[in-house]
Image (spheres, rainbow, N blue to C red):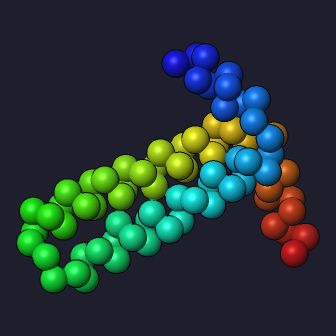
């Protein structure tokens, strides 16, 4: 677990932002698939997979950015 955390922290700020942004489509898909005309069991399975992927991208992006990266991201968003 620690080696994975070290490798993620070694990635660039830009990579962290890209990975963090990848969670948004998976969140949209996880809730949007509820509108599809498929069985409840299939909807549940799709929701679990898509929501899990969204959370994985979210936590990986946060691990890449770290506390300092999050501060940088916030300051860039405030300027715009």
In the rendered image, is residue 67 in sight?
A: no
| Residue at the spot 10% in from the left edge and 69% down from the top edge | 40
| Residue at the spot 58% in from the left edge and 16% down from the top edge | 2
**Most foreground residue, 76 or 50:** 50
User: Which of the 4 image quarters holds residue 35?
Assistant: bottom left
| Residue at the spot 73% in from the left edge and 48% down from the top edge | 15
Residue 29 vertical placement versus 22 (above, below)? below
Q: Is residue 4 left or right of residue 48?
A: right
Quadrant into which the C terminus falls: bottom right
Residue 57 vertical placement versus 67 (above, below)? below
**Most foreground residue, 68 or 23:** 23
- The location of residue 70, given as percent across then percent down, is 75, 48
The residue furthest right is: 79
- The location of residue 56, given as percent across then percent down, is 47, 45
Residue 7 vertical placement versus 16 (above, below)? above
- The location of residue 5, given as percent across then percent down, is 62, 25
């Amino acid at each position: 677990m620690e080696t994975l955390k070290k490798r993620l922290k070694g990635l660039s700020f830009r990579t962290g932002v890209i990975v963090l942004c990848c969670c948004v489509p998976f969140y949209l898909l996880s809730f949007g698939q509820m509108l599809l005309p498929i069985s409840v069991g299939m909807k549940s399975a799709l929701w679990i997979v898509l929501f899990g992927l969204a959370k994985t991208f979210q936590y990986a992006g946060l691990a890449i950015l770290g506390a300092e990266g999050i501060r940088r991201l916030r300051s860039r968003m405030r300027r715009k």
